[in-house]
Amino acid sequence: MKSPSSSALVSRFSALVGPGHALVEAADTARYLVEWRDLFRGETPLVLRPADTSEVAAILRLAHETKTAIIPQGGNTGLVGGQIPVPGRQEIVVSLERLDKVRSVDPLGNSIVVEAGMPLAAVHAAAAEAGRFFPLTLASLGSCQIGGNVATNAGGTAVLAYGNARNLVLGLEVVLADGRVWNGLRRLGKDNAGYDLKQLFIGSEGTLGVITAVALKLHHRPRGRAVAFASVASPKAALGLFCRAQRSAGFGLTGFELMSGLAMDFALRHLPGARLPTTAAPWYVLIEVSSSLSDGEADAVALDVLAGATAAGEAIEAAVAQSLSQAEDFWRLRHGMSEVQKYEGGSIKHDVSVPIGDLPAFLDEAMAAVEGAFPGCRPVPFGHMGDGNIHFNVSQPEGGDRQAFLSRWNEMNAVVHGVVRKYDGSVAAEHGIGRLKVDLLAEVKPPLDLEMMARLKDALDPLGILNPGRVIRRP
């Protein structure tokens, strides 16, 4: 903030959102200043809660005039610290939580326009009410917001069939750094009239503009769904099972998740009521098959896949959910894996991707590398095998010192990311860059990539007021 001690400037910003929506007291701002994994804690002189796009625009006009740093924030579920203001820098948080309305629904055109602060679960509900289905699904479904999902190009467990957030966006409304509003809320399936400007803002993490509304692509909900759980001996066996499932189910394969035995042990230990559907094994997979016809068809495909996999030695044992509640129990094991790791002490996270065919070799090599470099550490890999994205997390040694382990975060990153780069993978598969990986990005991106990113930043935010120091660090 240009004049951090200026109460007059705080008053000017506060007047833009009205009484009760400009928060300055510590008790009121606290929930906006802590990342849920507690890796980042922030400070701010002010949290603003605008009611609509016009108020966001007014905030950015004043920020542009006064050269005040603005941190856009959605549901505060981000995992790389981009939404948390840096202590001492007097950055103002702009929460989009009050922009939570459905603007329009078009079932015939399979689209919905919603405001950025709408929780993802509410988008699902609005789509369902219109007889349609919005497939983006994350563990933070009830608390993350669609604007943040789009700003970070969120992935989740349905990417295999439906793609990342960017594949589900038809159009955007964005407030630019100088307060002008770009209305790109088109709902067209095809539009090749010039550059696809919306793609600049998807995945830009609030550094190029503030997303205030989104036009989303809807789908017809599959009429049939089968969820299966299988124990496997290794990632190589899981890859064989994945290829078999793809051959049999085709586009009907809507989920394929890989989980290590230790990740499952943590879930069984710390998720209330959790039960293992098969016998214990070194690795597990969760498979979802969807059908446009019926549950019977989905079940038949899943059973055929599992029977073939068991006969071929790709699966040790398998089970198909016999009810909706059992299917949800299977998914609960997978979705709970991020949360339960905190009960096992410090955890160093990696959100990486490699080509699908290289996953078994990558996992074998990365696990051996971290165990060799950090004796006693416990690798806990799990994730979206169907799209090559693995959350390669590493928990501290049992009984070890949490802070001592976490202090070696960069060392651990260097070991894991070294293996990732060997396989021409990505060190930020779906969580983004934020503050956590901004220096890492500068190390792994080619110079021309960084130059083009910097030029985009300079063009759209020449004063550097939008999420400064996130994604790309400017002088």
Image (spheres, rainbow, N blue to C red):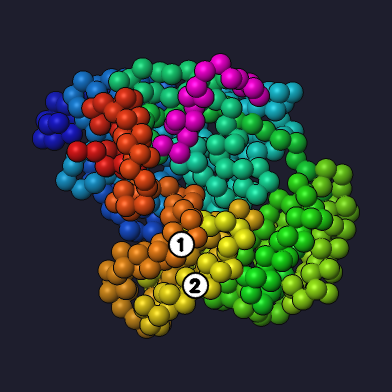
The residue positioned 49% from the left and 46% from the top of the image is 143
Q: Is residue 3 visible?
A: yes
What percent of the width, then of the height, locates residue 461? Answer: 30, 27
Position above or below: 188 against 85? above
Disc 2 is placed on an element classified as helix
What percent of the width, then of the height, locates residue 117? Answer: 47, 34
The residue positioned 61% from the left and 53% from the top of the image is 387
Give the quadrant of residue 399. Answer: bottom left
Q: Amino acid at mark 2?
A: Glu
Disc 1 is placed on an element classified as helix
The residue positioned 62% from the left and 47% from the top of the image is 159
Which image quadrant: the N terminus?
top left
Residues shaded magenta: 187-204
Residue under pointer 1: 422
Q: Which is more toward the observer, 230 or 134?
A: 230
Q: Which is more toward the observer, 15 or 373?
A: 373
The residue positioned 80% from the left and 67% from the top of the image is 306
Give the quadrant of residue 276. Answer: bottom right
Position above or below: 52 against 296? above
Which image quadrant: the C terminus?
top left
What percent of the width, then of the height, locates residue 413? Answer: 36, 64
Q: Main secondary structure of the magenta part?
A: loop
Q: Residues within 10 Å of mark 1 (few under 14, many from 20)?
A: few
Residue 189 among those drawn in magenta: yes
What percent of the width, then of the height, locates residue 362? Answer: 52, 67
Which callout, 1 or 2, points at the residue further toward the start of the chain?
2
Label 1–label 2 contact, CB within 8 A: yes
State the mark number for residue 365. 2
Q: Amino acid at mark 1?
A: Lys
Give the quadrant of residue 204. Answer: top left
Position above or below: 345 against 72? below
